[in-house]
Amino acid sequence: MANSATLTGPTGKKPRKMLSPRNIMLYGTLIVVAMYYALPLYVMIVTSFKGMPEIRLGNVFAPPVEITFEPWVKAWSQACTGLNCDGLSRGFWNSVQITVPSVIISIAIASINGYALANWKFKGSEIFFTILIFGAFIPYQVMIYPIVIILRELGLYTKLGGLILVHTIFGMPILTLLFRNYFTSIPEELFKAARVDGAGFWGIYLKVLVPMSIPIFVVAVILQVTGIWNDFLFGVIYTKPENYPMTVQLNNIVNSVQGVKEYNVNMAATLLTGVVPLFIYFISGKLFVRGIAAGAVKG
């Protein structure tokens, strides 16, 4: 028996080599892709902490010899964004006032739409869903002028309320699709049990679906915050200078042709503009992945 065991040897899968050709190719590709995206970010960060004399030396990749926060202060509160020289601070609060209600309203309505389309079939529901999804693939540029006319007639053109309405409507189709597909993946027995217990439309939605659907709500929040906060086209068309969102003011700072080109201020302003979407993603990234994996993109 001993000789047999000796000849047979250990059982199970053969351990893989750490430096196998497959691993070298895989991790090499990942490193190259990571560097492709991380290198510009690195240049932006180090440049934003340099003074202009050091930047003029041309050492783009070198870390700052003397760290200064002056570019960040100027980008936030002193840089000129047209006729006003109050930095990005005004645009930041405009973006907050635009993003928060747009995200809340669009997600609330889309989640109810998805719930109704998934579990409360009504006459014409499939036609309604098809028309709604078709709207998600219409280019935004086609709707620019008609929306200008509609907002003008409603008295909302150039106002923050008009831009909130636009973002809410344009976010509805894709969010409805996400919620509808997520809710169809939930076992129907849960809804039947809730109905037996006397729960109606709103009872099932608030007490059963919402607590179970945190991942898909996080997915919707990340998608909407990223899309609305980073929007430039709607912001520059449907608002006026005092109501411009942060991205429009960033464009005015970076593309300014007056005075000396301050690359450190431009880099700091760009990083400040991207802080909010990055923060939202980093604090909820795991739930985002869970929401996608749990059926957010299943048909």
Image: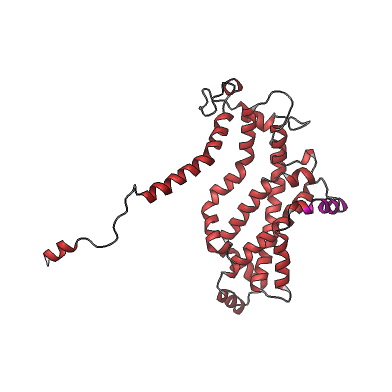
User: Can you say which quadrant of the picture contains the C terminus?
Assistant: bottom right
Location of residue 4 by image quarter? bottom left
User: Which one is nearer the viewer's eye here, 110 or 205?
Assistant: 110
In the picture as drawn, the residue positioned furthest to the front comes out as: 21
Residue drawn 68% across and 55% down? 104
- Where is residue 54 drawn, in percent x and y? 57, 21
**Does 284 appear above or below 245?**
below
In the picture as drawn, the residue positioned furthest to the right comes out as: 153
**Does 227 appear above or below 58?**
below
User: Which one is nearer the viewer's eye here, 265 or 85?
Assistant: 265
- Where is residue 288 drawn, in percent x and y? 55, 55
- State the extent of the magenta-drawn residues as a range: 142-153
- Where is residue 161 drawn, in percent x and y? 78, 50
In the picture as drawn, the residue positioned furthest to the bottom comes out as: 196
Side of 266 relative to 8 (left or right): right
Residue 53 on the magenta segment: no
User: Can you say which quadrant of the picture contains the N terminus?
Assistant: bottom left
User: Which one is nearer the viewer's eye here, 271 or 218?
Assistant: 271
Residue drawn 84% across and 54% down? 150
Q: How many marks?
A: 0
Q: Main secondary structure of the magenta part?
A: helix
Residue drawn 67% across and 70% down? 117
